[in-house]
Amino acid sequence: MYSRKIRVEYEADGQRHPAPLKWLDSFAMRNFTNDQVFDDTLPTGDGAIEIGARVPLERLKTAMEDWFRRKGYLEKGAALLVTEQVGQRRQP
């Protein structure tokens, strides 16, 4: 649906895990009404979202990390990794 495929993982105790779909849905629904820049986000599975061209990746990471910590999903000391899947970009 959107042009960019994004991988969302968290690192805890030296291991990487995909962010659960529940977390991604929670973030997407919250931002659906609170910040228009994130309207173009679509969770597609554990650790996977698709985003539109106007969504800034670093701002997305910062907002997700903040939301996940406030919800208690991301524990103190855990790191969030948000990366664009190179070569996976769809043509608009």
Image (cartoon, rainbow, N blue to C red):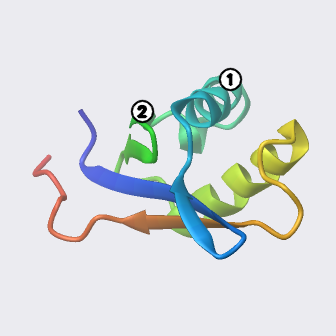
- Callout 2, which amino acid? Leu
Q: Quadrant of residue 25?
A: top right
Residue 15 vs 3, above or below: the answer is: below
Residue 50 vs 9, above or below: the answer is: above
- Spot occupied by residue 50 in the image (x, y as percentages of width and height): 35, 43
Furthest toward the bottom, the residue is 14
- Spot occupied by residue 74 in the image (x, y as percentages of width and height): 78, 52
Q: Helix, strand, or loop for circle 1? A: helix
- Spot occupied by residue 57 in the image (x, y as percentages of width and height): 51, 64
Judged left or right of residue 82, residue 68 is right
Q: Residue at x 64, y 35 (%)?
A: 23
Q: Residue at x 19, y 58 (%)?
A: 89
Q: Residue at x 71, y 27 (%)?
A: 30
> What label does residue 33 carry, if any?
1
Q: Helix, strand, or loop for circle 2? A: strand
Q: Quadrant of the N terminus?
A: top left
Q: Residues within 10 Å of mark 1 (few under 14, many from 20)?
A: few
> What label does residue 42 carry, if any?
2
Nearer to us in this view, 21 or 52 = 21
